[in-house]
Amino acid sequence: MENKNTVESIENKWWIRLLIILSRWVVGATFIFSGFVKAIDPMGSVYKFNDYFVAFGLEFLIPLSLIFAVLLAAFEFMIGVNMFLGSYRRLTSCLVLFTMIFMTPLTLYLAIANPVSDCGCFGDALILTNWQTFFKNVLLLAITIFLFIFNNRIRGIYNRPVQWITVLYSLIFVFAISWIGYNYQPILDFRPYKSGLNLAKAMGTESSDTGSSGEYLFIYEKDGRQQEFTLDNYPVDDTTWTFVDRVEKKTPVIQEDEFIKDFMIISPDLGDVTDEILTNKNYQFLLLSSDIAKADDSEIDRINEIYDYALVHGYNFYCVTASSQEDIARWQDDTGAEYPFYYMDETAIKTIMRANPSMMLLKDGIIYWKRSASSLPDESVLTASLEKLSLGQIRIYNADRRIMFLALIYLVPMLILLLTEKTVAAIIVNIKNLRMKRRQEKALRSKGRKINIEKETTKNDNKEL
């Protein structure tokens, strides 16, 4: 009795309650982040699972890598959300504890034996060494044990009747972004090859200024008409023009904060043609395929249409692959491909784009856009030269905008549910009661029919007697 009072006294202390809440947030946020970045880039998780299966001699599981990747992301995200919100407190504490009990010894083995250099727990968003991962897991395990003991002492943010809705919506959200990442490309790009990157500069320097580059435009007026001139052609000797203003023309390009080391394109005839491609001031289409034998050819018509379009307008079109000459020849026979084939390291291609195949538009060493084959334009869009089409404009990757969009998509419905949970809970209870009432009425009707049948049977038996 004395021990029980002591435990209750400890639980009622404000700092214990605060520690429980902070622990929930730390563990929950870690699992949410881990599951989220895996869901964003399911193919990245597939490659990591493949590494694990090869390292542990489980190659027969490789065909199931995608299923494991999606389910692991959903599981981590779900228990992270539940822990953060304090939902299903006992069950969530058990699931998190069992997960950490499994992961901590595993990461210790990875740190000692180093069969896989990067555990992949945070995808490409945050790369930790195996030892860093192990120490992180030790800390999380300690916090998880604390939560296993005390997590049930403080109620969650949502009431119990509506907690299943938060779980269902979280699963829908995480499966949706996994589907987009697998069928198109990750909504958030954690890799160095982002749209808008100046590859030529990124390969030459470790760091450069980012943001926008610009040139000055000089505005002059003549006969009531204003015209813009550059520094090279402004009318310095023509006195009929009157200077009006000078403005800086911003060119939103060129993320150069990444240092690219593995981008090398090899021609079977000319050798290294990387510099030639990166310094070409014309548009260039690069069809990317890490393994052309496994490439999806369902969109081959779109690819061939873009190749024909490139020929008509004088743009270069190459297929860049890591495949063998035999696989390339088979692809040419199956698809009628007439474009030249160049070579690149398989890992580099997978880093640039996850889909197989995919396409990238380059000009003057700048990545204008990247697309999976399923999102390529068809011939109805290719009606003019790229200079006149939106297809020929740089699609600047804006991580902040995408993060804000995802946050709104997820958090707004969760907030609406929080503000209306009493009403929603009452509706759920009424629906349950209505269903129970209908089941009872159905049971009574069935029982009544059974009694009537028995009475009728008894009556018939009496008549026979």
Image (tube, grey):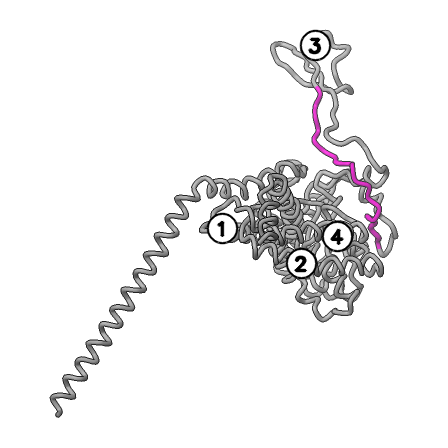
Range of magenta residues:
248-267
Whether residue 38 sits left or right of residue 192 in the image: it is left
Counting residues from the start of the chain, the first of labels 2 and 3 encountered is 2
Coordinates of residue 202 in the picture (x, y in percent)? 81, 39
Write down the residue under mark 3: 243
For the point 62% across and 54% down, the residue is 148
Precedes in sequence: disc 3 or disc 1: 1
440 relative to 398, above or below: below
Mark 2 to mark 3 CA distance (whole Å): 70 Å
Contact? badges 4 and 2 (CB < 8 Å)? no
State the image coordinates of residue 208 (x, y, percent, origin top left).
81, 33
* Residue behind mark 2: 99
Q: Which residue is mark 1?
A: 163
Asked if 215 appears above or below 310 in the picture, the reply is above
Evaluate whether residue 305 shows in this view: no
Q: Amino acid at mark 4?
A: Val
Q: Tell me which amino acid carries mark 2.
A: Thr
Residue 431 vs 229, above or below: the answer is below
